[in-house]
Amino acid sequence: MNPEKQQIATLHDAARKAMAAGQLRAVHEHCLAILQIDPTFADAWFLCGVVAAHNGSLSKSIEIFEKATALAPDNPEYHAELGKQLLADQQPERALQEATKTLHLSPSQLTTINTLGSLLSHVGEHEKALGCFQRAVRSLQRRSNGDTSLSSKWQADLYFNYAASLQFAGCFKEAATAYEQSISILPLFFKAHSALSTLRQQTEDDNHLSRLDGLREKVVSPRDQLHIGHAIAKEQEDLGRFEEAFDSLVWAKQAQAHAVNYSREKSDRLFTGIRDLFSAGAFTSAKKGHDTNEPIFIVGMPRTGTTLTEQVLSSHSQVFAAGELPLFPLQVKRSIASTVTDLFDLETFAASLATNSADLGVHYIESTRPRTGHTAHFIDKLPLNFLFLGLIGQALPKAKIICLRRDPMDTCLSNYRQIFAANFLHYQYNLNLLDCGQYYLQFDRTMRHWHQMMPGRIFDLHYESLVKNPAPVVRDLLNYCELPWEEQCLSFHSKEGSVATPSAVQVRQGMYATSVDRWRRYGDQLQPLYELLQSAGIYRS
């Protein structure tokens, strides 16, 4: 070996050891020394990308990973990490491309397979993600007595990912086993405890309450408290102990509510600002959108039947469920060259009034490829798209828009009972019951506004009518979507495919009306919420 190659080998070995020890500055120094000798040494670029990602330099890490993949296009680890950073940078289309490349390269490294599984899950390829997690778990289990250099945290995360994918696929017993395995590795894995509690109806003879109660004093963060409190509340509710369940929810949310300091006033300004911007004047201009009837948007408050409706419609032979796509808001951001990371800021809506509607519609449809396009229609089920209906109506004038409506008290309670994605600003209202009520009032006013601005464009689907009398309601829904009747839309719960939402367990049960008027079981504890809604004219005395 010539001296230069020997020097590179020594530096590379030192860089890899420094990475394993978490010594990022040393990694960077070793890699820079390598690149001074050989600027085409791909792994030095890759390790520099890892350092940049660890330091929060998202755009820099993407640039460096792109260099590494260009130099070593057959390395699956490089493509997987690039995809991960692209996803973090709100580029899901490109992330899917990198995930597809990684999959075709058949990675053998455990960590890469797990990264690929997470990436595929986040871009909506849940069946492929499950295959990756299954492969990674089997590989881990083949190691003698679990002997591995991977940390307990990493192993617990892998089993959690595997369990979540099994849950999405409707394999609930297998998911429970995987969650338990995750907990056995990391007993204080609070997220796994809360996920496990949702898989089935708990009974007096078979529940986790004793174990969960023992964890209350071991929480170390607001997020831990949120997860363990929700798990306790879910199981108490299953046992009919509604007063205790409500108290557990209040306790669960206290620390997180204090940490995020949600502003009801800021939320109100967003809603009011959108309605003011998209007044009658915004709809009288001669804007012409993209001439396609492909998309079907399902919008509404979370936990109101949006997933149920998606499953009903996607059982139709002409419809594909693309999932909760952030793509329309992203295309709006790109159309105005916004650098603000928040997808739902008022400045974006104001600037969007000057966008070319047809171009926006075309770019949105293109951004959904290649997952869409193989059926006549696809469903975009991002609930918060209800904020963008003014733009959707202009950019895609032939798109179908379905808005789920549910009893206001049940809507607010169901939102309050849910754990939403960490640090997602626009769902932080659910940390306080009265904030849920105020958010509902603004949602209701905004939907009434869209109906007034776009008469006849939006189909209001009432959850209670759907579950109590499904056949005629589904027929009306299909008629609105200009789809012929297909009987399988009533047996949606038996179709194959993953359901990657908090409703994954419920929608497998078919139509049921047991969640109607759930709020009445909580009695006087919900009286302040009822009075708030009543004072706004939602309920008549």
Image (tube, rainbow, N blue to C red):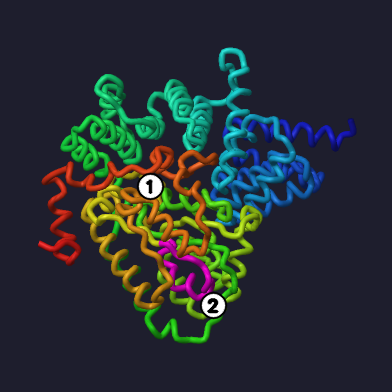
Residue at (67, 33) in percent of width and height: 16
Amino acid type of disc 1?
Phe
Query: Mostly what secondary structure, the magenta segment?
Result: helix
* Label at residue 420: 1
In this figure, what is the number of numbered marks? 2
Q: Is residue 57 visible?
A: no
Q: Nearer the viewer, residue 139 or 125?
A: 125
Real-space Cα separation, disc 1 to disc 2, in angstroms: 32 Å
Task: Bin the neighbour count of mark 1 within 10 Å (Cα to Cα): few under 14, some 14-19, many 20 and up.
Answer: some
* Label at residue 355: 2
Label 2 secondary element: loop
Q: In the picture shown, does residue 179 fall above or below 68?
A: above
Estimate the x, y position of residue 290 in percent, counting from the top left: 59, 73
Amino acid type of disc 2?
Thr
In which quadrant of the rendered image does the C terminus lie?
bottom left
Estimate the x, y position of residue 434 in percent, counting from the top left: 21, 55
In which quadrant of the rendered image does the N terminus lie?
top right
Q: Nearer the viewer, residue 15 or 517?
A: 517
- Residue 443 picture quarter: bottom left
Give the extent of the magenta segment: 385-402
Which mark sits nearer the N-terminus, 1 or 2?
2
